[in-house]
Image: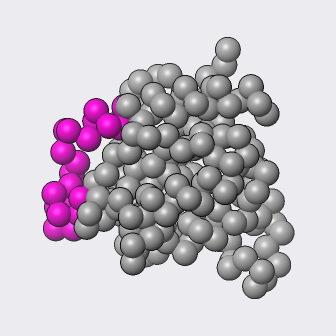
Amino acid sequence: MSKLNIGIILGSTREGRLSPQVGEWVKKIADERGDANYEIVDIAEYKLPLLGEADASEQAEAWNKKLFELDGFVFIVQEYNHSITASLKNALDYARDAWINKAAGIVSYGSVGGARAAEHLRGILGELSVADVRIHPALSLFTDFENFSTFKPADLHLTNLNGMLDQVLAWSGALKTLL
């Protein structure tokens, strides 16, 4: 059986965002495992306008094409006002069929580890028929980011990250049989 393709989705598009640092950490650890093909998928690169406000057929087609190539996902989610970013919600809404019967893990960060954003994302993923896994690395802006800007995760997060990746791969492999 060929390796699964797992997209590490950066959930923010704003200038100065921290998600690329977190995404690179996830990818580095995931690549060291050698058990799947991992790639960072930056929603900022797709330049999706607000859904319904402009003709975005070209951007939406590219976004959906990328999602269809992936067997599962790891969302890098930062908490904004107790929820996910508007750009991530918009990107989720631009696809429908590409999400169905796939699995996802969540790596969140914020003042309380991004837990509230992760819980909001779980509800949205359920509506999109994405099975989200239980293990969830939650990173603190106070202890895992030096001066709130340089990502320096505590070693204790490796256990949760690897456990989450184990679950994403198991569920992605099982759900792939439904596609």
Q: Percent position (x, y) of residue 2?
A: 66, 19
The image's colour scheme reads one colour
70 in the magenta segment: no
Q: For the view shown, which residue lies furthest in the top direction? A: 1
In the figure, residue 86 lies in which quadrant?
bottom right
Q: Quadrant of the C terminus?
A: top right
Residue depicted at 67% across the width and 14% down the height: 1
Q: In this image, 24 relative to 93: left or right?
A: left
Q: Which residues are magenta?
A: 140-162
- Relative to 110, 81 lies left or right: right
- Which residue lies most toward the bottom here? 53
Number of disc labels: 0
State which quadrant residue 55 falls in: bottom right
Most foreground residue, 6 or 93: 93
Is 72 drawn above or below residue 109 in the view shown?
Answer: above
Q: Is residue 134 left or right of residue 141?
A: right
User: In screen coordinates, is 10 left or right of 103?
Assistant: left
Residue 68 drawn at (x, y percent): 74, 44
Residue 100 on image: x %, y %: 73, 46
Do we see residue 68 in this rendering?
A: yes
Residue 142: x, y in percent?
17, 63
Does the segment drawn in magenta span residue 143? yes
Q: Is residue 150 visible?
A: no
Residue at 16% across, 57% down: 143
The structure residue drawn at horizontal position 21% and vertical position 68%, both measured from the top left corner, is 148
Residue at 74 percent across and 59 percent down: it is 95
